[in-house]
Amino acid sequence: MFDYLIVGAGFAGSVLAERLANASDKKVLICDKRNHIGGNAYDHYNEHGVLVHKYGPHIFHTNSREVFDYLSRFTQWRPYEHRVQASVDGQLVPMPINLDTINKLYGLNLTSFQLEEFFKSVAEPREHLRTSEDVVVSRVGRDLYEKFFRNYTRKQWALDPSELDASVTSRVPVRTNRDDRYFTDTYQAMPLHGYTRMFERMLDSPNIKIALNCDYQEIADEFAYREMIYTGPVDAFFDYCYGELPYRSLEFKHETHNVAQFQPAPVVNFPNEHAYTRVTEFKYLTGQEHQKTSIVYEYPQAEGDPYYPVPRKENADIYTKYKALADATSDVHFVGRLATYKYYNMDQIVAQALTTYAKMRGEKRAAAAVAAAAAAGAAFNVGGNGNRNDNGHGKHTRELLSSAR
Ligand code: FAD
Ligand code: UDP
């Protein structure tokens, strides 16, 4: 009998498995339909011996000391500050847009102060910053929007920035100084021996059993467990009863070249040329020394593994309905980027998982207190489904599901 069946061995599932096994002495079965742990952060040595990220570049950055300290139990770090160049008008310029970007692009010699004035002169003021277009155009005007954001976004999401929430392009700042780092978080580092090694250490516990190549639906009836933690797509869990939530996918084209260095920056973005959005050269990220070098091209597409929730109101409305079902399914905890339909970075997922664990412990303590009080003869009425053995959804959820169909 397992205490928990955890669906998905990415950050969300692995952090919860580790906490439940090591801090609460629970028996955990964690499964993943892929043939590896680590979820989208999985990395491996390819056939040439170069360490690559199978699902595109994963750069760790956070402002949360708690998250950084927690992960530091499982890995040493390699300090790494990420830098990106964008190919625009035939030259490579720093992205996010900064003082050097503008001076190089327009052949100017502005100071930071003059650049602020320049942005003000070209910006199109907007009363409300509702869309991803509003955010950029109101800060840097239409020309820079067209050069750096419009076409990249249309490729990445198959939507115009005017159709996407402001939160999407807000991820990328605009600067008037010469800081060319992609992120400015307090902690910026890569796991010294890679993500997969870090996950192996997280899951290395006698209380944790791992089942790979295994969809949870194949085993949910075979093994007894008390509660489930689900980190897959939330719409799939509920049989798409409110329709499919759009997730954006990518095709990754990996290549290895017989040269020590392929491009002049870790990532080069191509807002306007090519069907792919960006090219990543992994050795910059990992610090590995090797005679050859491996790169990956990212081709956005609709079909394929779900990678990105698509932030816009229509989708948030659908998700709200699934969330009501999820909230009513008291013996399943929904955690992670796909299960909560949030465009979260790795550190935010770790934080979400740690918070979920704290809440579960709190609830358990409260439940134990209630049970103890009940045993002592107090007239308490314990609600909820309690521990279940039937591996089915709770009655309340079944009712919600049937009314949804
Ligand atoms: P996932 O990693 O997606 O794990 C979910 C797991 O559940 C998957 O392994 C899946 O196979 C499994 N699963 C789903 N359904 C089932 C089922 N029915 N049965 C069994 N298993 C199932 N974040 C950063 O902080 N920095 C970055 O630089 C960065 N770059 C990124 C680049 C790309 C291209 C992408 C797509 C994401 C990037 N992210 C980055 C985000 C990061 O990948 C996520 O925040 C994080 O991996 C989410 O972890 P998760 O556990 O929620 O989901
Ligand atoms: N973006 C863009 N041009 C760029 C970089 C980013 O238009 O050169 C927009 C695009 O919509 C992208 C979003 O900003 O999806 C967020 O960029 P980020 O680099 O955070 O994307 P991720 O690494 O999550 O794919």
Image (cartoon, rainbow, N blue to C red):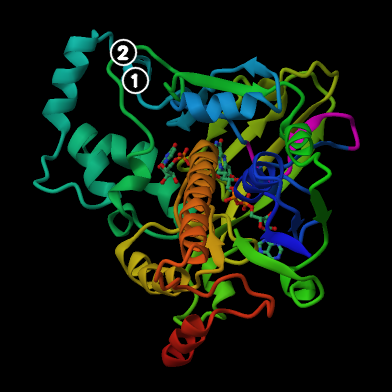
Is 115 placed above or below 231 here? above
The part of the image, by quadrant, that contains residue 266 is top right
Residue behind mark 1: 98
Residue 26, x across and y down, in percent? 71, 51
Residue 38, x across and y down, in percent? 71, 44
Dividing the image into 4 quarters, which one contains the N terminus? bottom right
Residue 85 at least partly seen: no
Is 263 placed above or below 6 here? above
Instruction: Describe residue 45's horizontal placement relative to residue 147 as left or right.
Output: right
**Tag 2: residue type?**
Asn
**Tag 1: residue type?**
Asn
Q: Which residue sits at x=68%, y=80%?
A: 390
User: How many labels, in total?
Assistant: 2
Q: Earlier in the sequence, mark 2 or mark 1?
A: 1
Instruction: Describe residue 167's horizontal placement relative to residue 61 as left or right.
Output: left
Q: Which mark is residue 177?
A: 2
The part of the image, by quadrant, that contains residue 43 is top right
Is 322 placed above or below 357 here? below
- Magenta highlight range: 47-57
Circle 1: element type: loop
Discs 2, 1 touching: Cβ within 8 Å: yes
